[in-house]
Amino acid sequence: MWAEHEDLIERIFVLELMDDRTWLVRTAGEAVTSLVGRRLSNHNFLDLWTGPDRVMVDACLEAIRLDGGPGVIRGRGETLSGARAELEVTLMPLSAGMAGATRSRMLGLYQTLGSEGALNGQPVFRHRVSMIVPPDTRRIGPKLRLVASN
């Protein structure tokens, strides 16, 4: 099974929320570095996105942080020459440690959907959002119904 996912570790990164509300990339695997064409460590993750996409990604990160559940960002990566590949970024909050503490770190998985060959070895220059799946905050509890009969 591990042989099927041998490059998984290279696609993982860690984010940390800083006091100035930036999401600093603490570490990123070599596959992530290769796909974006630069080291992301100590850079703001939100800088990968522009305009309304940046606002939506920021809101998704905040929802994940507050709700404590995973979220997914689906989109498209484009190179400077116009080559495109479908991308998926999966994010999950890391434990806050103490009860009631605010979550400030996330584990992320950055991967292409389909062939990375479509990028022709060029780095992703522009990220575009096509879909955001925030955490599912529905509380599923017992399904009891009170029935009164007179």
Image: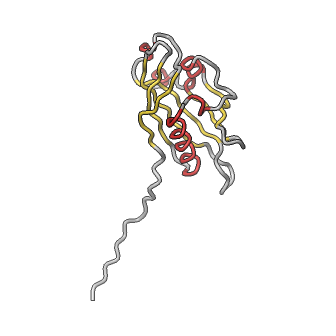
- Outermost residue, front direction? 51
* Residue occupying the point 56% across, 34% down: 108
Front residue of this view, candidates 109 and 52: 52
* Residue occupying the point 57% across, 17% down: 34
On the picture, is 131 further left or further right than 98?
left
Query: As displayed, is residue 51 above or below residue 82?
Result: below
Q: What is the quadrant of residue 115 in the picture?
A: top left
- Outermost residue, bottom direction? 150
Quadrant, the N terminus: top left
Q: What is the quadrant of residue 36 in the picture?
A: top right
Query: As displayed, is residue 145 above or below residue 107?
Result: below
* Residue occupying the point 64% across, 37% down: 23
On the picture, is 146 further left or further right than 69?
left
On the picture, is 98 further left or further right than 48?
right
* Residue occupying the point 43% across, 19% down: 84
- Outermost residue, right direction? 19
Front residue of this view, candidates 65 and 98: 65
Residue 106: give x, y in percent of width and height.
60, 39
Quadrant, the C terminus: bottom left
Query: As displayed, is residue 57 above or below residue 142?
Result: above
Residue 47: give x, y in percent of width and height.
60, 30
Residue 14: give x, y in percent of width and height.
62, 33
